[in-house]
Amino acid sequence: MEETNEHLKREVGAMGLSANLVNIMIGAGIFALPAIVAAGLGSSSIFAYLFCGLLITLVMLCFAEIGSKVTSSGGAYTYIETSFGPYFGFLTVVLFVLSATSADAAVANALVDIIGTMFPVFKSNTLRILFFIILFGILGYINVRGIKEGMLVVKTITIIKLIPLLLLVIFSWGEVSLDHLSINSISSIEDIGKISLILFFAFQGAESGLSISGEVKDPTKNIPKAIFISVVGVLILYILIQTVSLGVLGASLATNKENPLSFVADQVFGPIGFTIMTIGAAISMLGNLSSEILSIPRILFRASKDNVLPLSPLSKVHDRFSTPYIAIIAYATSGFLLASFGGFQQMAIISSASILLVYLGVTLSVIKQRRKKAKPTSKEFRIPGGYLVPILSVIIIVWLLSNLERQEFIGFGVYLVILTFIYLLKDKIWKKIKNSQ
């Protein structure tokens, strides 16, 4: 079995990586966002999906190119750190991990809330915390045991979560009213931009799944293939889900914001459909968490090895299981703590902006790497069209970020200044430690 210079085994194929990407992208968002998008854009909501699909396709093409050149673990962090140095690597890893951890905490709370609608006993705070301990403990343990075990869980849950969504799409067409789908007016660019900033949550995640690139077989071939399969598949599925949801419920879709797909299933299949879709939503959220706990610790692991995060235990690899077990345990523990404290909705916009900035860094990394190395090797993937795709990606990301409110811009700017201060302080402390040795 081929090992990387990080002592991690390359055991993940194209379909395994595709499953990981799909599993993270199809999380909690698609089970709630159809109603939110319909409330903002009505029957023209399809344009927001196409816009987000275009952006994620352009960005993932950039990921595919840079991922075929930089094949060690860490995903977006490694691409940016390799291209622009440790300061930008530090910003990337902190923004990335903080965003992912808070998102995981929110998903965990949403998961226990859904279970609580069927079993009210889970509304107890004590039982919620116990549930979080078991949830993050089991997922952490599985991933410490090995990448194969973690991927088995990811593949299994990916299949299970897709079944109710595919059944809903297939069997809802008989209940679809074409009148509900007719577009009487097209929303303004500003409205599409604002809704797209929210909808983009449903498309995020592929960048997290690529964090296991150091354990992918033949990465120069399998990473681009997995990205193409997952992004195209998810985009088509999302458009179909929005179409049937709007076609079945019409204007009432916008009023069912808590669990819209379950109401669509209730309309098509009756009460049993509501129950099945609710269970499917819970499984989807569980799958999202399993992929996050599989993927994000690899970023901590890589950043520790690079001394960007001066926490050397995070770079330890288990002697028996060949996994970054300290990073996995640390991440799972952080997820449990944040989930237990709750109240992370206020971080949603910061999380979204953080991911978009990470995407911006990756697209700029493609340009930087091309300038450093004009001719790719025969195994490296290169986006056709010269610099068109990365430049378009930069323009769209900047435009999407421009939809943030003024207060959010100021708050996010302060956040980056604080991170810069921490980096400078960390760097000085790290140099003193080095000099004293």
Image: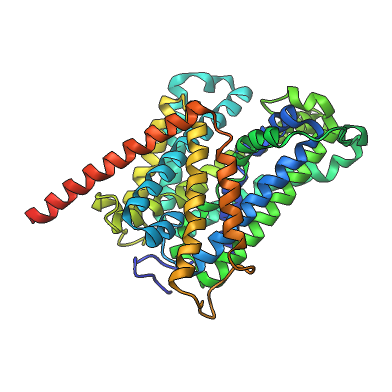
Residue that extends furthest to the left in the rendered view of this protein: 436
Q: Is residue 5 left or right of residue 126?
A: left
Q: Residue at x 71, y 33 (%)?
A: 37
Visible in this render: residue 287? Answer: no
Vertical placement of residue 45 versus 54, above or below: above
Vertical placement of residue 173 versus 208, above or below: above
Vertical placement of residue 54 versus 281, above or below: below
Q: How many marks?
A: 0
Q: Residue at x 38, y 32 (%)?
A: 414
Q: Is residue 262 left or right of residue 298?
A: right
Visible in this render: residue 8? Answer: yes
In the rendered image, residue 353, in percent from the top left (x then y), is placed at 50, 39
Q: Is residue 338 left or right of residue 434?
A: right
Quarter in which the N terminus is drawn: bottom left
In the rendered image, residue 407, in percent from the top left (x then y), is placed at 48, 26
In the rendered image, residue 423, in percent from the top left (x then y), is placed at 28, 44
